[in-house]
Image (cartoon, grey):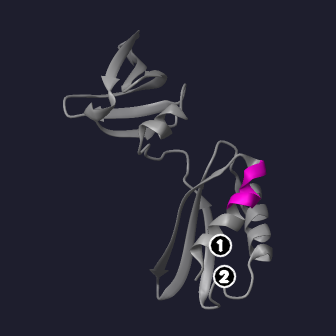
Amino acid sequence: MRLEVIKTKLSEIIKADNLTIYSIKPKKEFGEKILEILLKGKEINTNVLEAIHLQLFEALEEGDLPDDYFLELSSMGAEYPLNSLSEISEHLNFFVEVRTSKYSLIGYVLEIEGQTITFEYNDKGQFRKKKIKYDEIVNITTRVKV
């Protein structure tokens, strides 16, 4: 399997849709070999995924993906972890859940200054801002506001 070739071809295809590749990894499920590709972006729906899947399948050449593999293309979904300060900076004004060793809050990423992130959250009807150093964050995940 030529993962780098597949990744390069896929990157070209998704560029127009402002999507990024979250992960590409082979896996086994129910005895079947699958190449799982997860995409991330604001405007992903089943129609977009279907079009990308068809374009990628047409772009693949003999040997890129072994015949005994299935291609599985899906989105990260609405809620997913942010794994770096860079990813957090791409999510300004996004609704997130932040956990540190002392507390957790659900609110919006307002700004980033150096290694400090400012969040706005609702505390019993009062909107408050809290600055948290990046290295204090145990987990930060996008959330859907209901």
User: In the picture shown, does residue 17 fall above or below 140?
Assistant: below
Image coordinates for residue 109, horizontal then vertical, percent: 47, 25
The answer to whether residue 146 is seen in the rendering is no
Does residue 28 appear left or right of residue 76 in this picture?
left
Q: Is residue 115 above or below residue 34?
A: above
Dot 2: what SS? Answer: loop
Badge 2 amino acid: Asp
Give the quarter of the image for residue 132. Answer: top left
Let me know if residue 74 is in the magenta part.
no
Q: Position of residue 133 (x, y in %)?
A: 31, 26
Residue that badge 2 annotates = 64
Residue picked out by circle 1: 5
Q: Residue at x 78, y 74 (%)?
A: 59
Query: Which range is magenta?
Result: 11-16
User: Under tag 1, what secondary structure?
Assistant: helix
- Taking the spot 41% from the left edge, 21% from the top edge, the residue there is 119
Residue extending farthest to the bottom is 68
User: What percent of the width, then of the height, locates residue 67?
Assistant: 65, 91
